[in-house]
Amino acid sequence: MGYTRWSDDSYSHLKTSRAGASVDDIFTNNATGRASDLMLPHGVKMRESRDSDIHPESLSIAVYLDVTGSMGRIPEILVREKLGALMNTLIDHGVAHPQILFGAIGDHFSDRFPLQIGQFESGTDELDQWLTSIFIEGGGGGQHMESYLLGWLFCARHTSIDCFEKRGQKGFLFTIGDESSWDQLDAAALKALMGYPEASTVSDRQLLEEAQRAYHVFHIHINEASYRDNPAVLGYWRGLLGERLLILDDHNAIAETIASTVAVIHGVDLKNVLATFDAATAKTVGSALAKIESMVTKTGDATKGAFKL
């Protein structure tokens, strides 16, 4: 996947065409009450991110969106307004060939569709297709935990990415939400969700370590509403990810935060990226990435996996 190009004109047309559309008009699987069969992970062997003539140096970026509760508004924001900010910020700051996989996360204990998986794509229509194919289940278990570790599981065991396999350049994996992750997946859950004939219980830390072999892994905590500055939630993420926890005070800056993180780790000065945003967005993103910038400065070039936090 990822054999088409991003087009601002195409995205502008899509935005205009949806000016009066409802959420269910955009996310058509909401009307069916179930996830698209094309996005269900059961039995999926691999999602691929490949180099091509038009993308000779692809960079894989996986973005997992929490679609429980109020977090379901974030896919809508990306579709209506921010997909262009994500792609243009990447391309304008030296990431010429991004290939993005959009996925959705729920709760594997209580939701029917706790993991939905798109494909790695570069073109406007294809990125839009997978974003709008997400079923916003709106569930969650009423705890302060969701199944973010499913994103680590899938990327670790079910993706094949040329940036890492051909060039030793790690991809990027972002989970986005406002709660902690469940700390394990048992064998029954793995069998039901993924179709593994035999499985054993795996922990969040184990899956994170597997994913980190080929990806820079981050979690963006949406620091709003019920879990704003929540010590249990933030303590969980700090204990697991350290500085790779990005605390974002405004969910409207999701796209800019993702793109800025990638650009900074690839050696772009954060000040140069922030200068392209409006003042409010620049302040929000700058606060979220302040520690990342300092670590990149200390460790040097990170494009081949040397970035350590």
Image (cartoon, grey):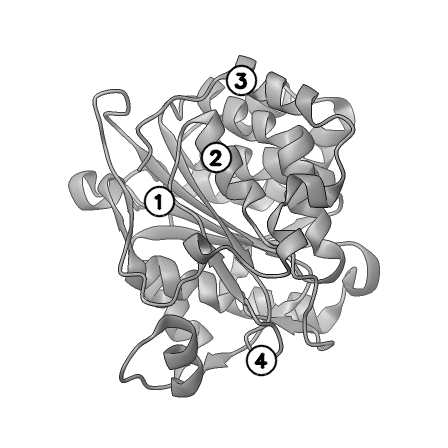
Of mark 4 and mark 1, the one earlier in the sequence is: 4
Whole-number angstrom distance, CA of label 1 to CA of label 2:
18 Å
Q: Callout 2: helix, strand or loop?
A: helix
Whole-number angstrom distance, CA of label 4 to CA of label 3:
39 Å
Of mark 1 and mark 2, the one earlier in the sequence is: 2
Residue wearing tag 1 = 171
Residue wearing tag 3 = 10
Q: Which mark is residue 109?
A: 4
Q: Comparing marks 1 and 2, which lies closer to the viewer?
A: 2
Residue 104 % position (x, y): 54, 56
Whole-number angstrom distance, CA of label 4 to CA of label 2:
29 Å
Whether pointer 4 and pointer 1 mark residues with C-beta atoms closer than 8 Å, the reply is no
Amino acid at pointer 3: Ser
Residue wearing tag 2 = 127
Front residue of 40/205: it is 40
Amino acid at pointer 2: Leu
Callout 4: few (<14), some (14-19), or many (20+) C-alpha neighbours within 10 Å? some
Residue 2 % position (x, y): 33, 33
